[in-house]
Amino acid sequence: MKKILAVFLLFVLSFPTTAQVRGLPDFSELVDKHGAAVVNISTTQVVKGRNQQSPFPFDEDDPMFDLFRRFMPPPGQGRGLPRDFEHRSLGSGFILSADGYIMTNAHVIDAADEVVVKLTDKREFRAKVIGADKRTDVALLKIEASGLPTVRLGEPGALKVGEWVLAIGSPFGFDNSVTAGIVSAKGRSLPQENYVPFIQTDVAINPGNSGGPLFNMKGEVVGINSQIYSRSGGFMGISFAIPIDLAMDIQNQLKASGRVSRGRMGVVIQEVTKELAETFGLGKAQGALVSSVEKGGPADKAGIEAGDVILRFDGKAIVSSSDLPRVVGMTRPGTKVQVSVWRKGAGKDHELVVAEMPLEEKQVAKSRAKPIEQSANRLGLVVSELTAEQRKELKLTFGLLIEDIRGNAARTDLQRGDIVLAVISKGTTTELRSVDQFNRVLSQFDKSANVTLLVRRGEVQTFVTIKGLNGEK
């Protein structure tokens, strides 16, 4: 019996543990080797005293505003806040070079009057801001030190979805906190973030982690933890990191000149939907659809027109519209590139000289014309012809004013005051000059047809597809 029991125990112990079967990683060696290169960053901003209607040191959309509102007297009661006071914030960063160059997020040091870097050995240094780029949220700092531990850089392109990654930072001020997870997706586009193909992970990231490194299992930095998706202000399982190769290109420019130079081609673009792809005769939804071209800009000089679908830029495929700003932005101004477009059912190449994007983008002014009542057409649009005064004000020689939106058109992004410039069908563009003409064009479509319109709103043009018509042919 004892012999049987001994054989049974030997058989059981020969099986791997659950952790070995699943291959769960041990991060301790990685943290020991590279944790010392991660720093805590604290900033101080001197805030001028607010008026009595705004007694708190935070805006109303700041998570801390509610906390202050609960525990401070309302305006006019108590002694109030000092005339000037210090606002402090925390973030993270990592050391790039032994002589003290440090990378972090631009939003961590934004508007700071003083930036202090704290190392894992408790030493503190006042940092100099070499430069910051808000469009990519990358900043470069410098401290006066030598012999510092540094990180090793990896290749974000080699990351695989499902691969383990690790973050080190200072969430809520807790220095050198370690969290781990997996790569959830690559090349993510976020609203208002056109220049960064984010790495999405499920690594726990919270306020204070911003600017800290994202490591792969080789101990290489593959990204900078930058943003989280949250409805509560805390971590909800989705976080985003800036790929380190993009960040290093930005830091090289900041180090050289303190600013970032970006390319521009002078177009307004939109995503190519399945319906738009059918309208323009594309085999599948791909590329960036040009909705308007800046007069006298690089694209205009190269012969690119509204309605072109950009498929390649400088040899790089444009799979979705979000790819184009990144590729163009990272192209040096003055570079001559080839742009491949799809126009009227055929491909065409243009040679374009990339211009430089201005430091501050101009705000587009909007103009609105006064409505004149008309009945709805088959699309559900109530339109009217522009008066001579309106055409002069809008600088248009054709187009119809949208006064009301009904039926299927109400499911689109169309708004009252938009100008319908043209109807596009099978690669053919028909400019609209009268209500009667618009109705004649619509009469040629079957009831189930998808109709694509070229629409102008303010100074911006866009393509809108309305699925199906109202009423009979």
Image: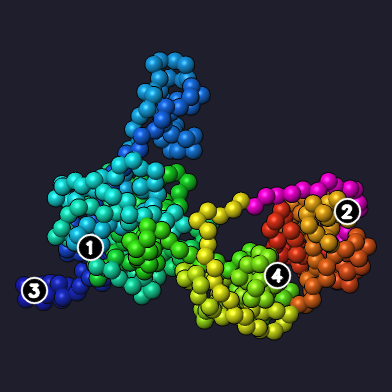
Q: Residue at x 15, y 58 (%)?
A: 146
Look at mark 1 in the image and give the residue it sits on. Answer: 97
Amino acid type shown at disc 3: Ala
Q: Residue at x 23, y 52 (%)?
A: 143
Does label 2 or label 1 sit earlier along the sequence?
1
Q: Residue at x 20, y 47 (%)?
A: 125
Look at mark 3 in the image and give the residue it sits on. Answer: 6
Whether tag 4 and tag 2 are in contact, CB under 8 A, the answer is no
Amino acid type shown at disc 2: Ala
Camera-nearest label, 4 or 2: 2
Label 4 secondary element: loop
Does label 4 or label 1 sit earlier along the sequence?
1
Does label 4 or label 2 sit earlier along the sequence?
4
- 473 versus 115 height, above or below: below
- 152 versus 456 height, above or below: below
Look at mark 2 in the image and give the residue it sits on. Answer: 388
Q: Nearer the viewer, residue 217 or 72?
A: 72
Camera-nearest label, 3 or 4: 4
- Between the residue at mark 4 and the residue at mark 1, the CA separation in whole angstroms equals 47 Å
Label 3 secondary element: helix
